[in-house]
Amino acid sequence: MVQEVAIYLVVHQPRRIKLPAQLIPQGVSAEDMEKCLFDERLNQRYFDKVTRYCYIPATDKFLE
């Protein structure tokens, strides 16, 4: 009879593209290009919501 189980979960949240799109200046660094492409405020908002309604409740179920 199995006495222990290991559960492996992978959590993924896509990054949201900033809209409307903006031109990326020539010679911009990779870090600054990232700031031009992705909407970090929106990413954080969705991450917080998914965490509250999915990740935390699912984790709590595993810990019961």
Image (cartoon, grey):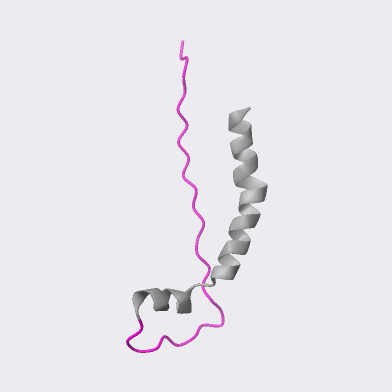
Residue 50, image x, y percentages = 62, 53
Assess whether residue 4 is covered by the magenta stretch: yes
Q: Residue at x 63, y 33 (%)?
A: 61
**Residue 22, position as x, y percentages in the image:** 49, 86
User: Eyeballing the image, is 13 above or below 39?
Assistant: above
- In the picture as drawn, the residue positioned furthest to the top comes out as 1
* In this picture, residue 17 sits left or right of residue 61: left
Query: How many tags in the picture?
Result: 0
> Is residue 58 toward the left or the right of residue 35 in the image?
right
Residue 62's quadrant in the figure?
A: top right
- Expressed as whole percent of the image width and height from the top left, the position of residue 12 reads 49, 52
| Magenta residues (range) | 1-28
Q: Position of residue 63 (x, y in %)?
A: 59, 30
**Residue at 50 percent of width and 61 percent of height:** 14
Q: Nearer the viewer, residue 32 or 53?
A: 32
Position above or below: 54 against 26: above
Magenta highlight: main SS: loop
Q: Quadrant of the C terminus?
A: top right
Q: Is residue 43 above or below residue 50?
A: below
Q: Name the residue at 51% across, 83% down.
A: 21
Residue at 53%, 68% (x, y): give it: 16
| Residue reaching furthest to the left | 27
Residue 25 lies within the magenta run: yes
The vertical placement of 24 against 17, above or below, is: below
